[in-house]
C-alpha cells in the first residue's frame, strides 16, 4: 500500500474565488503536472430559492444551479496513483489506486476518493484501471452553504463514471430519460460520498441541483421520491443576489437533529387524530383541524413552519409559472419570517441581512437559504437597485454584527458537464 500526503508550496494557488478561463485552468494544470490536460469537467454550486427544512419532512425544495462551481481537469498517468491537487488548497495527496479509503484529518481529497470508491461499489462493472493526475478549482466560497462540497462530488462522479465505465455512460446519456437517470445517479453517488467520506448525513438536494441543474430553470424536487420538474425562472431585469454572512455560526448537527426529532413528535401526536407519515402530507386546511392534537408547544411551532413552507413552495412554483415574480418574492420573505419565528434557525446575522434587504426599494424578496444560523441569504433584486442594495445591506449588517458581508450576483446555470 502506498499513501503519501505532503504540502507543496510551489503549486499555483487561487483562494480568492476569482473566475478562471478554461485556458488559464489548462495552463495551471500544465504548470502543476508538466503535461497537458486530457479532459475537463464542471459542476455548479447551488442555492435553494424556497422550501427550507421541508426535505426530511417529505416535502419539496426548489433549488437552482449557479454559474459558479468546481472544475476538474485530469490526465491518465502510468503510475497507478491518484494525484490530487486543488488550486484552492495547499495540501497535495497521492493515493495508490488499490488503497482507496477515507483519509484522516478532514482531508479535502475525501470528497473525491469517496465518489471513486462509491462508483466501484454501486457498479460492479466499473473499473479503475489507471492512475490519474487530477486538478480541482472551485469558485464557490467553501463552507458558505452554497455547496462547494456537492459541486466537487458531482464533478468527480461525472468524470470518473466516464473513466471507469465509459460504454455505460455513453448509453445512459444517449436519450433524454437516460440522461436524467444518469444525472440522478451522479447525485446519489455524491450524497453517499458525503455520508461515508465526509460524515455529513445530508439530504440529496445539493448534489441533485448540481447534477440536474438547467440554465434559467429551478428544480422543483421531492427529495423523498426524487420526482422533479424544471421550472423556468424568467428574471427580466431582476437578479438573484446571494449575500454571505461570513458568520462563524452554523446549523450544527445537534440543532439539526433537534428539529428532526421535534417534527417526528408532531407527526406522532397528529397521527392520533389523522395518521400521517410526513408533515408534508398536511394542507393548511388539514393543519387547522389537527394542530390541537400537538401538545408540545415547540413541536407545534416546528410543524407549523413545515406545513406553511410546503404550501408556500407550491404557491411560489405556481407563481413563477404564471410570471408573477413579485408574488414569488413575497413568498420568499414569508419563508424567512417562518424560519425565524417558528423554526428558529435564523439568528442575528441572517436576520440582520434579511431585515436590511426588505427595506431596499427594488427588492422583491429576501430570505435565508440553506440550513440556517450562518451561511447566506438569497434575494431577488431589480438590476437598477443592486448597487444600492449592496451599499445599504452591507452597512446595516456591519452596524448590527461587526461583520462584513459579501455579495454574489448569480446566474442560474446548467448542471454538471464535460467541457473538453
Ligand atoms: P459547503 O459545501 O457549504 O461549501 P462544506 O463544509 O460542506 O461546505 O464543504 C467544504 C469542503 O469541501 C472544504 O473544506 C474542502 O474540504 C472541500 N472542497 C470544496 N471545494 C473544494 C476545492 N475546490 N478544492 C478542494 N477541496 C474543496
Ligand atoms: Mg457541503
Image (tube, grey):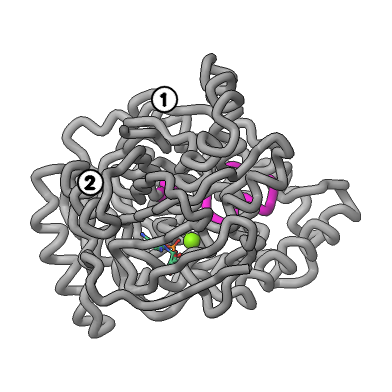
Q: Quadrant of residue 398?
A: bottom left
Of label 2 and label 1, which has the lower sequence position? 2
Residue occupying image coordinates x 20% and y 81%: 399
Query: How much space separates mark 2 and mark 1, taking CA atoms?
Result: 40 Å
Disc assigned to residue 403: none
Magenta-highlighted residues? 46-60
Which class describes the residues within 10 Å of circle 1: few (<14), some (14-19), or many (20+)? some
Residue occupying image coordinates x 52% and y 75%: 106
Q: Which residue is mark 1?
A: 321
Contact between marks 2 and 1 (CB within 8 A): the answer is no
Which class describes the residues within 10 Å of circle 2: few (<14), some (14-19), or many (20+)? many
Magenta-span inclusion, residue 54: yes
Residue occupying image coordinates x 85% and y 59%: 268
Q: Does residue 306 appear anywhere in the picture?
A: no
Magenta-span inclusion, residue 74: no
Question: Which quarter of the image is occupied by the C terminus?
Answer: top left
Q: Which residue is mark 2?
A: 26
Question: In this figure, what is the number of numbered marks?
Answer: 2
Specify whether 417 is left or right of 25. right
Amino acid at each position: 500500500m502506498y499513501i503519501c500526503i505532503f504540502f507543496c508550496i510551489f503549486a499555483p494557488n487561487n483562494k480568492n474565488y476569482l473566475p478562471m478561463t478554461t485556458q488559464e485552468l489548462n495552463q495551471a494544470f500544465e504548470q502543476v503536472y508538466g503535461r497537458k490536460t486530457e479532459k475537463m469537467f464542471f459542476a455548479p454550486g447551488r442555492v435553494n430559492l424556497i422550501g427550507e427544512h421541508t426535505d426530511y419532512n417529505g416535502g419539496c425544495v426548489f433549488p437552482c444551479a449557479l454559474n459558479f462551481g468546481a472544475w476538474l481537469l485530469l490526465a491518465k498517468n502510468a503510475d497507478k496513483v491518484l494525484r490530487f491537487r486543488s488550486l484552492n488548497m495547499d495540501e497535495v495527496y497521492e493515493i495508490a489506486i488499490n488503497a482507496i479509503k477515507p483519509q484522516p484529518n478532514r482531508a479535502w481529497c475525501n470528497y473525491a476518493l469517496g465518489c471513486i470508491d462509491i462508483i466501484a461499489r454501486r457498479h460492479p462493472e466499473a473499473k479503475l484501471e489507471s492512475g490519474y493526475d487530477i486538478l480541482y478549482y472551485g469558485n464557490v466560497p467553501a463552507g458558505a452553504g452554497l455547496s462547494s462540497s456537492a459541486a466537487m462530488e458531482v464533478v468527480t462522479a461525472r468524470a470518473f463514471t466516464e473513466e471507469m465505465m465509459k460504454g455505460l455512460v455513453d448509453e445512459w446519456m444517449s436519450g433524454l430519460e437516460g440522461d436524467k437517470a444518469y444525472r440522478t445517479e451522479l447525485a446519489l453517488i455524491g450524497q453517499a460520498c458525503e455520508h461515508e467520506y465526509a460524515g455529513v448525513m445530508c439530504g440529496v438536494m445539493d448534489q441533485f441541483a448540481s447534477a440536474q441543474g438547467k440554465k434559467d430553470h429551478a428544480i422543483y424536487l421531492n427529495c423523498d421520491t426524487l420526482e422533479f420538474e424544471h421550472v423556468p425562472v424568467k428574471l427580466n431585469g431582476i437578479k438573484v443576489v446571494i449575500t454571505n454572512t461570513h458568520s462563524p455560526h452554523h446549523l450544527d448537527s445537534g440543532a439539526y437533529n433537534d428539529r428532526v426529532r421535534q417534527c417526528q413528535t408532531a407527526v406522532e401526536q397528529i397521527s392520533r387524530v389523522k395518521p400521517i407519515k410526513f408533515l408534508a402530507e398536511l394542507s393548511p386546511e388539514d393543519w387547522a383541524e389537527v394542530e390541537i392534537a400537538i401538545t408540545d408547544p415547540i413541536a407545534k411551532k416546528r410543524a407549523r413552519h413545515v406545513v406553511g413552507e410546503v404550501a408556500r413552495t407550491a404557491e411560489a412554483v405556481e407563481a413563477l409559472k404564471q410570471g408573477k415574480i413579485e408574488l414569488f418574492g413575497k413568498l420568499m420573505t414569508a419563508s424567512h419570517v417562518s424560519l425565524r419565528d417558528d423554526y428558529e434557525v435564523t439568528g442575528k446575522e441572517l436576520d440582520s441581512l434579511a431585515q436590511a434587504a426588505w427595506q431596499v426599494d427594488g427588492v422583491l424578496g429576501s430570505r435565508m437559504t440553506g440550513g440556517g444560523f450562518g451561511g447566506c441569504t438569497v434575494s431577488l433584486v431589480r438590476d437598477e437597485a443592486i448597487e444600492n442594495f449592496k451599499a445599504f445591506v452591507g452597512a446595516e449588517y456591519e452596524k448590527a454584527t461587526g461583520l462584513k458581508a459579501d455579495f454574489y450576483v448569480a446566474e442560474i446555470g446548467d448542471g454538471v458537464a464535460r467541457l473538453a
